[in-house]
């Protein structure tokens, strides 16, 4: 699974020196770049690890809007409560970019409240045609946006298109 360095979940990050049969890049993985060049390099890095298939999920940035408040949710348990809040700030010099801020508030039942800032991350919209071009430039033989198949991230309001890339 390809996961960004700034992800608040604790999964291992994709090892770019290893080859995988299939790589899953969800949650708009390729939007975690501050420039077109960085985005293209990110795609090439992931593609170099794929032997057969890359499965990508992408929001339709052309036909949907990002809200200032991307995601807010709380998880309650017997040991306390955790609240996650994500906010976006547009970059005034480039309409395709934004800054992504993530905050986690932990309220243990028997301790003081703590705030964790996961980081401010530069993000950039990724479009289907652009992604297809970058994948073909990196050596893919087939790029297919699955019709009527969507992935809905667990705690988000939007749906993401599922894309299959074969090598």
Image (cartoon, grey):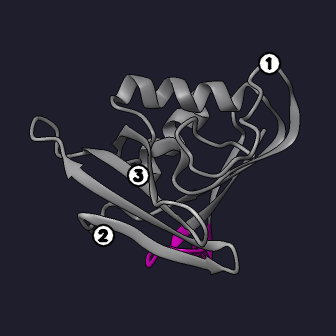
The answer to whether any part of residue 34 appears in the image is yes
From the top left corner, tell me how far across and down residue 57 is, in percent.
Answer: 59, 59
Left or right side of 124 for 8: right
Q: Is residue 89 magenta?
A: no
* 25 relative to 13, above or below: below
Magenta range: 146-160
Residue 158 drawn at (x, y percent): 44, 75
Q: CA distance from mark 1 to mark 3?
A: 29 Å
Image quadrant in which you'd find residue 5: top right
Q: Quadrant of residue 35?
A: top left
Tell whether label 2 touches label 1 (CB within 8 Å).
no
Q: Residue furthest right?
A: 21
For image coordinates 60% across by 80% down, the residue present is 76
Count up the numbered dots: 3
**Mark 1 or 3, closer to the camera:** 3
| Residue lying at 64% horizontally and 24% vertically, measured from the top left | 45
Q: Which residue is mark 1?
A: 17
Using residue 121 as the reference point, say whether residue 14 is left or right of it: right
Q: CA distance from mark 3 to mark 2?
A: 25 Å
Left or right relative to 51: residue 15 = left
Marker disc for residue 102: 3
Residue in the foreground of this view, choosing between 9 and 166: 9
- Give the mark nearer the N terminus: 1 vs 2: 1
Q: Secondary structure at mark 1?
A: loop
Circle nearer the N terminus (3, 2): 2
Q: Residues within 10 Å of mark 2 (few under 14, many from 20)?
A: few
Which residue in the structure is indicated by mark 2? 63
Q: Position of residue 89 (x, y in %)?
A: 21, 50
- Depicted 42 relative to depicted 150: above or below: above
């Amino acid at each position: 699974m390809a996961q960004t360095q700034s992800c608040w979940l604790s999964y291992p990050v994709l090892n770019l020196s290893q080859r995988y049969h299939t790589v899953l890049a969800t949650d708009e993985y390729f939007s975690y770049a501050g420039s077109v060049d960085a985005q293209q390099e990110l795609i090439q890095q992931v593609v170099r690890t794929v032997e057969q298939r890359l499965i990508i999920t992408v929001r339709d940035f052309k036909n949907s809007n990002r809200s200032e408040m991307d995601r807010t949710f709380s998880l309650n348990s017997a040991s306390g409560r955790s609240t996650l809040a994500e906010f976006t700030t547009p970059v005034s010099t480039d309409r395709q970019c934004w800054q992504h801020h993530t905050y986690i508030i932990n309220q243990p039942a028997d301790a003081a409240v703590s705030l964790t800032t996961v980081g401010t991350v530069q993000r950039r919209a990724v479009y289907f045609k652009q992604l297809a071009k970058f994948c073909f430039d990196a050596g893919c033989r087939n790029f297919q946006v699955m019709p009527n198949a969507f992935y809905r991230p667990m705690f988000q309001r939007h749906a993401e298109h599922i894309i299959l890339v074969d090598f």
